[in-house]
Amino acid sequence: MHLRDVLDTNISFVHWFAEFLVKDLTVEQLHWQPSAGSHHIAFALWHTIRTEDDFIHGFLQQKPTVWIEGGWAERLGLPSSAQGTGWTAEQVAEMRIVDVGGFLEYMRAVDAAVLEYVRSLDDAKANEKIALPFFEGAYPMLKEMSRGELLAFLCIGHNTEHLGEIQYLRGLQGLKGAPL
C-alpha cells in the first residue's frame, strides 16, 4: 500500500464527516455561540476548509486556490484572502455563512481538488521535504515535513481538531454529533 492510498482513504472520510456534521444545520445553528468570544460552527468550518485550500493549493502546489479560482469570496460574501488564523473574537463573531448550500459546493470543490492532488503523488514526491518557516513560533518541532506528512497534518489532524469543536458545539445546542 502506498502513502497516497492511506491519505486518500482518511482525507475522504474527514471531508465526508465535515459535510455530515453541517449539512442539516440552520443558519442560526451554524452561528450560535455558547458565550462571547467563543467560535461558532460556521467559523470553525470555514477556517478548516480555507486553511486546507490555502496550504494544499497555494503552498504545496504553488497555484491559485479553489477559493480564488472559483470566485468563492464574491459568491459567498466572505473575505477574499483571510482564513481566520489570528482573528479577534469580534471578527469571529461577525463572520457569517448565509449561503450554506453554496459553501458546501465550495467544500466539495476543495475536496475534489485535494484528492486529485493526493492521487497524483508517487512515493518520491510524497516523501519530498518542505521547509515550514511560518510554523516556527507556534510549532517549533515542525520546521520541515514531507508533502505526505503535511497533507496528513492539515487535512486529517487540523481538520479533525476543528470537527471536534463542531461536534461539541452541536452537542451544546442539543444536537447529535457523530452517527455512532
Image: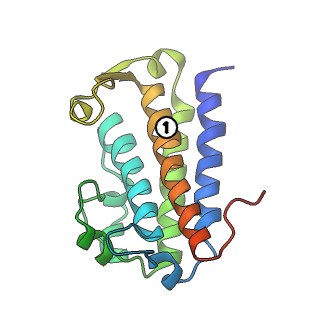
Three-letter amino acid code at the position of disc 1: Tyr
Q: Nearer the viewer, residue 81 or 29?
A: 29
**SS at mark 1 in the image:** helix
Q: Is residue 77 above or below residue 62?
A: below
Q: Residues within 10 Å of mark 1 (few under 14, many from 20)?
A: some
Q: Is residue 28 above or below residue 34?
A: below
Q: Is residue 156 left or right of residue 132?
A: right
Q: Residue at x 54, y 50 (%)?
A: 112
Quadrant position of residue 23 = bottom right
Point out residue 18 in the picture as x, y percentages from the top left corner.
58, 58
- Give the quarter of the figure containing the C terminus: bottom right
Q: Residue at x 37, y 50 (%)?
A: 51
Q: Is residue 45 left or right of residue 82?
A: right
Q: Is residue 119 above or below residue 66?
A: above
Q: Residue pushed farthest top?
A: 124
Q: Residue at x 53, y 41 (%)?
A: 156
Q: Is residue 158 left or right of residue 22?
A: left
Q: Which residue is mark 1?
A: 117
Q: Residue at x 38, y 56 (%)?
A: 50
Q: Residue pushed farthest front?
A: 35
Q: Count the labels in the image.
A: 1
